[in-house]
Amino acid sequence: MKKNSTQWITGGFSALLMLSLAFGSCKKSTNNTPASEETATSSDNALAEHTVSDLTEMAAQASDGSSGLSSYRVAPGYDPVLALGCATVGFNAAAKVDTITFNNTMCMDGITRNGKLIIDWSASASGATHYRDPGFSCNVSSVNYTVNGMPVNIISKTVTNTTPVGFNPATTDLTWSINANISIAKSTGTFTWICNRTKTLLNTSDTSVYHGSARAISWAKARVGITGSANGNTATGLTYTATITNQLIRDFGGCNISGQHPFIKGTIQFTPNGHPTRTIDYGNGSCDLIYTVTVSGNTYTFTLP
């Protein structure tokens, strides 16, 4: 990725909060508005974007019945056999409900999570019992869920597998619709985020990733694309709109930075009410920790630690 391109570490919430508070490395704005004011709302949106993306991936891994929360379960450096993981997954096939319970310890991506995520897939089409099955639909809710101590409230979140029944994986990718309404309580205020998204498994045709209906997707090798729009209120109370103008891409097999899987490509147009549009640029596909926010002709470059 070029040095002026964008990327956000998946689940890198501590870094996200630091970015919201400290922008000392930013280019100074030529319109006398501090860089922190120019870009803080954009980082709020990035925080929400990755919060919902991670929630979706965790629901996918749990409900697909694969290796559980393979990207999240065990803290780095620990023996996965001997050490307690950061989460346990409970399955209730009769009620069609899965529960992810975090224990306030660090997960593999360096993030500490606590509380519960409840995945209710009772509204799925007949015979659709896994995330990979066309017609599978789940509602995700939260109970006292926190990320690095920051409360995340899932007001509503529905993920539905929209892939046609009987599809040919050699020519048709798996797709899901995502509708979510969440709030994130930051020290500076509460950020709300309502989205309509389409998620695509971009390498469905790879038989080492998608193995058909009988076996779980190998999420550790998945390449995922996200499109769609969002709206809500910033932590300072401004309404906003956010539209993905170039598909956001995460490559779980090709980009791993200390256990985290950042977006490596794509752009978002983010517009707070009464303010200029910001362009959040996640780069050209390279795996690094650099991203940019462009507003009013000024480009601010950030590098995550």
Image (cartoon, helix red, strand yellow):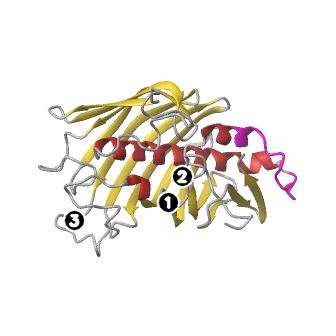
Nearer the observer, disc 3 or disc 1? 1
Where disc 2 sits, the SS reads: loop
Q: Which residue is found at the position 62% from the left and 65% from the top? A: 286
Badge 3 is on which residue?
164
Q: Which amino acid lies under the numbered mark 2 shown in the image of this protein?
A: His
Circle 2 packing at 10 Å, graded few (<14), some (14-19), many (20+), is: many
Q: Which amino acid lies under the numbered mark 3 shown in the image of this protein?
A: Pro
Q: Which residue is found at the position 74% from the left and 64% from the top? A: 3
**Could you tell which of marks 3 and 1 lies nearer the N-terminus?**
3
Badge 1 is on which residue?
251
Q: Which residue is found at the position 32% from the left and 55% from the top? A: 217
Badge 2 is on which residue?
261
Closest to the observer, 4 or 211:
211
**Farthest left residue?**
126
Magenta-tinted stretch: 18-32
In this view, 269 is above or below 153: below
